[in-house]
Image (cartoon, rainbow, N blue to C red):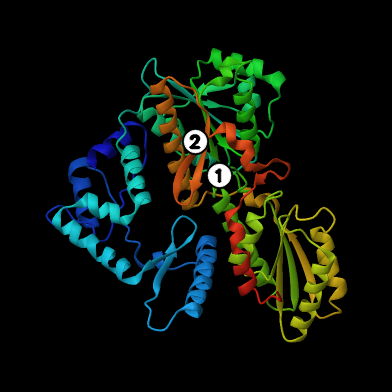
Amino acid sequence: MCEALRRGRAAGRRDSMVVVAEGACDRKSTPITSAYVRQVLEDRLHEDARVTILGHVQRGGAPSAYDRWASTWLGYEAVLEVLSAEPGTAGPVIGFRGNRVSRVPLVEAVAKTRQVPDLIASGDYQAAMELRGGSFIEANRIFAEMVEPSRIDAPEESKRVAIIHAGGLAPGMNAAARDAVRIGISRGYTMLGVQGGFPGLRDGDVTELTWGEVEGWLTDGGANLGLRRTVPGVEDLYRISRAIEDHRIDALLMIGGWNGYQAVELMHRESERFPACGLPVVCVPASIDNNLPGSELAIGADTALNVVTEAVDRIKMSGSAAKRAFVVETMGRYCGYLALMGALSGGAERVYLHEDGISLNALQDDLEWLRNSFASGRRLFLAIRNENANPLYTTDFLARLLEQEGQGLYDVRQTILGHVQQGGCPTPFDRLLAVRLVSRALDLLSAEFAAGSSESRYLGLVKSKVTAFPVAQMMAEMDVRYRRPKEQWWLELQPVLRAVADAAV
């Protein structure tokens, strides 16, 4: 630990942090307390160390968007389990595995949980880690690599990996770039940054990124490398090829949205005409729209959903003293992820998605239900609309319709959340997702370098596992017209929303 802190100081860190689990102990089962760690730091490093015990503040605070929609889904499934249970049968433990509800027999769950301390006591740490799950082992491995890197300076004549952003801004892009730089350097690569997306690559705006240069990027919003939505045309590929050759780029790590995926697919498709474009490329999903192929969740989507949930909480509170109906518009283009998940986590009664469309008959049913509901004592109504749910039935139209047909039972307010959904510090989930994805992306590039091949892939999180796919199959997975995958897992939650929203179905 002390050696790791010394390396951090040598690399330019002005502050360091040590996290101690309350049950930490050494291999002789002697407890490792925060006071003991502090004394070690003062004795060996001669530095003033401060102790902060978080305690019960970890139990406090408002639940995140994930905690709200996940618990809503689990509650829904638990009720279904009770209603379908047979007399005399043991019920399961219902939990989450990879954004899916999972059922485990109660006896099995308890037995495996009790095994963990027994395995630790016997010194079988590997088996104890395995019982914690694959993602726990992966996180431990990545953390060890981040705090004990093999080097903090790129070696001479190493492979050169360039990081590029493209598409719309997503919180967590800086975290992903920072993790890629540090893991890449530790693995022996020279890491480069492309300024301003693919136009910047075309213009040769490429510089080396050092270990210390990305020090503060983990918690930064925005994208310090800059990004553009511009998708290069075939006419740009010659200049892009020249830039790749001039800067001796051996591989490309694209962290971004659908525009970036399209650019990578174009380079792959035209690689015979422009051989330099045939270098290995890995696409890492980063988009608040959560509309990218090969990944159930994109970097930035969790942060944006938390912003939506916080905004909805405040909007609902503003109407607590009156009878009021709210219509809130989220971003997402033609993908309704933010709208549906925001409706679940924010307690909305209606959600309007492009995937479902909006019909006049459905609106008439909603209006009739709404009038009856307010006449029976309702004081608050919330509808969330995806920005491209319908080109004619806009947010303004829906608000005016509710106002006109309300017959004085309630007043109506509309809110378009806009670009606040792209701002803010990335959530812990997005930071963890970022480091998992870029670590796997660099694994793929290492395999390509070792094999002397140049396969391009896109990767993402699928049922808790980071999975990679060849770029050649990307377009077959997408509804290109509406910029979203043909299969979207979160649409399974529509019955959950209907069940908890006090809606007529």
Mark 1 surroundings: few (<14), some (14-19) or many (≥20) residues within 10 A: many
Relative placement, left or right, of 366 versus 299 is: right
Residue 431 horizontal/vertical position (percent): 47, 47
Residue 230 higher or lower than 35, as above or below: above
Residue type, label 2: Ala
Residue 196 in sight:
no
Q: Residue furthest left?
A: 28
Image quarter of residue 322:
bottom right
Residue in the image at 59% along x and 69% along y: 496
Residue 93 horizontal/vertical position (percent): 39, 70
Residue type, label 1: Gly
Relative placement, left or right, of 268 versus 149 is: right
Residue in the image at 55% along x and 13% along y: 245
For the residues labelled 1 and 2, the Cα–Cα distance comes to 12 Å
Residue 92 horizontal/vertical position (percent): 39, 71
Write down the residue under mark 1: 221
Residue in the image at 32% along x and 66% along y: 109
Residue 285 horizontal/vertical position (percent): 55, 41
Residue 177's mark?
2
Q: Quadrant of the C terminus?
A: bottom right
